[in-house]
Amino acid sequence: MAYQSEAQLEHLLIEKMQRQEYKRVVIKSEEDLTENFKKQFSLFNEEKLEGKPLTEKEWERVFNQILGFGVFRSAKKLRDKILIQREDGSDLYLELLSKNTSENLFQVTNQVTLVGKYTNRYDVTLLVNGLPLVQIELKRRGMDIKEAFNQIERYRKHSYKGLYKFIQLFVISNGVDTKYYANSDRELLFSLTFFWTDKENVRITNLSDFATVFLNKYHIIKMITKYTIVNDTDKLLMIMRPYQVYATDAIVRKATATGIGGYVWHTTGSGKTPTSFKTGQLPGG
């Protein structure tokens, strides 16, 4: 494979996401991000707004409910309804995300600059309803992807704030190797980054192939809404590994088709707990 710079990988990935029905949007600053969120959030909640745009005071009420929290609390907010009181005294329930892929609005942007302790510029961001839910960090082809992981750790410590607290998962890639992992309020470990595989457990490591299979809008919504566990006990996000996802799907399909219950058995350390938990939580489980 010929040499590919980080910029080339970024360009190809953005083109790929556009072909997968993500709309390209230019966001260069936190102010741009906020304005884009307001537009997308309003479109997503268009029916609930009933033709009455939010006033500045009502926007303040929305932001008071969703900003200023850590990753775990933001993940809880993402999955909950937002209740605000309109200026006329009526109650208004709004949402940030739908489990139905077709109801969400998908965008891709790159090189967003945020200023914290340091000024940082992020490679590629996938937005759903204006919220940055997936952050992708790239390194030139052949470079160790742990460098991308380390860079995200620096971003998390020094500049991720505001709407960026809604990031659910990270993707790191050098074009050849690509991995994913859940966001957290805690220090992240490289050992908890995962390769995606097909049902035969064959790794899908190439960035373009990974984008096709994992980052398409139908799959990414399932990973966020169905296969990410918001662990209330430990106050963290847990994203499932591919074999856990496939096992959960198979168990739920079988239970739905037969109406017969069962149990999950496997060796210690195989990932039974997340699989069992999600199997029981999902419809049909």
Image (cartoon, rainbow, N blue to C red):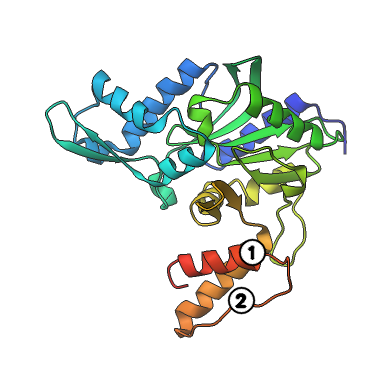
Q: Residue at x 55, y 48 (%)?
A: 220
Mark with earlier residue (1, 2)? 1
**In the image, what residue type sits under mark 1?**
Gln
Q: Which image quadrant for residue 170? A: top right
Residue 225 seen in render = yes
- Badge 2 crowding class, 10 Å Cα cut-off, few under 14, some 14 to 19, many 20 or more, is few
Question: Amino acid under label 2?
Answer: Val
Residue 122 seen: no
Q: Disc 1 and disc 2: Cα gap in Å?
A: 11 Å
Viewed as shown, does residue 177 lie left or right of 136? Answer: right
Q: Quadrant of residue 284?
A: bottom left
* Badge nearest the viewer, 1 or 2: 2
In which quadrant of the rendered view does residue 263 lie? Answer: bottom right
Please name whichever residue, 269 or 284, is drawn nearer the observer in this view of the structure: 269
Residue at the (59%, 37%) spot, across then down? 185
Q: Are marks 1 and 2 in contact (CB under 8 Å)?
A: no
Query: To which residue does mark 1 refer?
Result: 244
Residue 153 percent location from the top left of the image: 70, 31
x, y (%) of residue 2?
87, 34
- The crowd level at tag 1 (other Cα within 10 Å; few <14, some 14-19, many 20+) is many
Q: Nearer the viewer, residue 242 or 204?
A: 242
Q: Is residue 82 left or right of residue 244?
A: left
User: Percent from the top left, x then y, of residue 259?
Assistant: 44, 84
Residue occupying image coordinates x 67% and y 57%:
241
Q: Secondary structure at mark 2?
A: loop
Dot 1 falls on a residue whose secondary structure is helix
Measured as percent of width and height from the top left, residue 236 is found at 57, 46
Disc 2 target residue: 264
User: Which quadrant does the N terminus fall into?
Assistant: top right
- In the rendered structure, the answer to whether residue 116 lies left or right of residue 177 reads left
